Image (cartoon, rainbow, N blue to C red):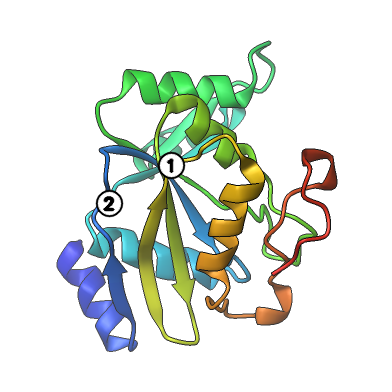
Amino acid sequence: MQKLALFLLKAFGWKLCIAPPPSKKYVLIGAPHTSNWDFVVGLLGLWGGRIRARFLGKKELFKPPLGFLMRALGGIPVDRSRRSNLVDQVAEIFKREEEIAILITPEGTRGRAPYWRTGFYYMALKAGVPIALGYADYRRKEVGIGAYLYPTGDIRKDFALIREFYQDKTGLRPEKQGPIRIREEEGEGAETR
């Protein structure tokens, strides 16, 4: 798959750039997320970089007949009805695994979102793993992982670094890129791209 992915990326004019991870475990975020094509480009980037990223899905999606396919694609079932929250469930997954990358799209939608969801941040913080800053930049035709950030617990400071990294990354539909900020209730408010 790696050779095929690299061939296809090159054939379509894309460049793969992956900074080596500082850990065998990390939360991988993918942004900007403005089109269904992000999945295709991102998947080719993961295959080309030999990264077996996993993703979260509600446990109901893992029942027959789709369950086998969801697991084969790297899905991890999570129970939203359990008393413990998703952050705790993911921290447990990181504790159990020797090597794992869990992929999250913090915008949560392909449309313009008013803020990023911060679950990825708290998952990495609780698990003590870095956040890999994955991207697909359609202007430069570049896909990859450009940097890693260990969350400090100061979400404002850490989001400023994340915002700085993504400020020059352009999605396929730039008009659908929302600001890289957190909800006001979490303390940041009006900061934008």
Quarter of the figure with residue 120: top right
At 52% from the left and 72% from the top, the residue drawn is 37
- In the image, is residue 56 above or below residue 138? above
Residue with the mark numbered 1? 150
Decide: marks 2, 1 in contact (CB < 8 A)? no
Q: For marks 2 and 1, give the one nearer the viewer.
A: 1
Seen from the viewer's position, the closer of residues 26 and 4 is 26
Q: Mark 2, residues whose alpha carbon is within 10 Å: few (<14), some, or many (≥20)? A: some
Instruction: Give the quadrant of the N terminus.
Output: bottom left
Q: Residue at x 39, y 26 (%)?
A: 94
Q: CA distance from mark 2 to mark 1?
A: 19 Å
Q: Answer with the quarter of the image where residue 128 lies.
A: top left
The vertical placement of 181 against 129, above or below, is below
Viewer-proximal residue among 40 and 175: 175
The image shows residue 67 at horizontal and vertical percentages of: 47, 33
Residue type, label 1:
Tyr
- Image location of residue 60, percent across then percent down: 60, 28
Front in this rendered view, residue 8 or 144: 144
Q: Which residue is mark 2?
A: 51
Q: Quadrant for the C terminus, please.
A: bottom right
The residue shown at (71%, 56%) is: 181
Image x and y of residue 173, in percent = 64, 80
Q: Is residue 21 left or right of residue 189?
A: left
Question: To which quarter of the image does residue 85 belong?
Answer: top right
